[in-house]
Amino acid sequence: MITVIKVGGAVVENEASLDRLIAQFAGLEGEKVLVHGGGRSATRVAASMGLESRMVCGRRITDDGMLDVVTMVYGGLVNKHIVAMLQAKGVNALGLTGADLNAIRSHRRPVKEMTLEDGTRSMVDFGWVGDVDEVNGEALLHLTETGMVPVMAPLTHDGMGHLLNTNADTIASQTACGIAAAGMTRDTRPEVTLTFCFEKPGVLARPDDDGSVIPLITQDSYEKLKADGIVSGGMIPKLDNAFDALRRGVSRVIITSADDIEGKGGTTIVL
C-alpha cells in the first residue's frame, strides 16, 4: 500500500500540531508521500515585503512578486523544515517541487470568466498559477520503492523554465493518481490511499461544530451539499480533487484531522 498524505498550512504552521503530524507520519508503515501547503506563511512573508495577497475562489493570485514569495516559502522554508523534522525521526525524506525530477508539469492557467464568491461573473487572471498536465508517477514510485519518502511542495513547472504556484490539494490528488497509474505496470498493483489532513476532524455539516462530521460523501450527496451551502469555499476544490482521484485509480480518499492520519475517522469520499 502507498499512502499519500496532504497536510494543510494551518497544521504545518503550528509547531505543536506539526510535531504530532510528523510523529504519526513517521510511524506509518509502508511506502508514503507527504504533500504540504503553507499559504498562511506565504501571506505573512508577502506582507513583510509590502506585497498584497489576493485570493479568488480560494486560490491565490500569483504575480511576479508573489511567485518569488511562494517559491521561497513553499520550496524552501516550509519544505526543508518538514524534511529536517522527518530526518530526525529516521525517515529518509526528500524535498521536491514539481520541477525536480520533472515530477509534475503544468501549464499556466489561462485568463477566464468565473463566478465569484458574491455570485457575480468576472474575468480572472491568476498569474503564475499552474494547472497540472502530467505527473511523473514512475519516478515518484521508484523513489518510494527504494525507501525514500518524497515531501512535495505545491510548486510545479511548465517545461519552459517557469515555476508555477499550484494548489496543494491538486498536487496531492495528481500525485496519488500518477503513482496509481505507474503502479498498473507492476505485477502486483499497489493500493493507493489519499488522505487530506487539516485542522478539522472531517467535512462538517455545521462549520462551528466539530461533532458534526459527515462520515460519507457520494457524488450525488456532494452536489446537494454544495447547493445547500453546507460545502463551500476551499472545501469545494478539495472534494473536486477527491472525486477526480477516485475516477483515476486511487483506491480510497479520506478527509480528516491531522491527528488521525491513519484514517480511522473523518469523512470518506466514494463515487
Image (cartoon, helix red, strand yellow):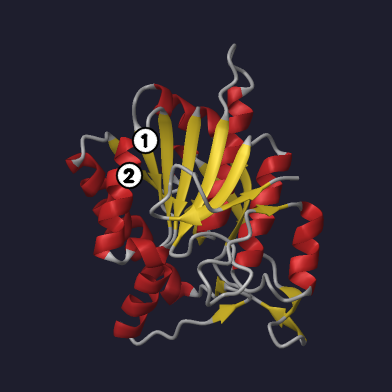
Query: The C terminus is located in which quarter?
Result: top right
Q: Is residue 43 left or right of residue 55?
A: left
**Circle 1: residue type:** Leu
Q: Position of residue 262 (x, y in %)?
A: 44, 42
Q: Quadrant of residue 207?
A: bottom right
For image coordinates 62% across by 54% down, the residue present is 215
Mark 2 lies on residue:
24
Where disc 1 sits, the SS reads loop
Q: Nearer the viewer, residue 39 or 111?
A: 39
- Residue nearest the observer in this picture, 224 or 210: 210
Residue 123 in the image: state x and y as whole percent: 73, 81
Q: Position of residue 132 (x, y in %)?
A: 62, 51
Query: Residue at left 44%, top 86%?
Result: 52
- As shown in the figure, which amino acid type bears the numbered disc 2? Gln
Residue 66 placement (x, y as % from top left): 43, 74
Residue at horizontal 65 percent and vertical 57 percent from the top = 239
Q: Kindly identify which residue carries mark 1.
A: 28
- 200 over 124 or under it: above or below: above
| Separation of marks 1 and 2 at Cα, in angstroms | 7 Å
Residue 114 lies, with reference to residue 156, above or below; the image says below
Indicate left or right for 265 with 76 as reference. right
Say left or right for 149 vs 57. Answer: left
Q: Secondary structure at mark 2?
A: helix
Please report the residue visible at 53 percent of the width from the left and 66 percent of the height from the top. Answer: 211
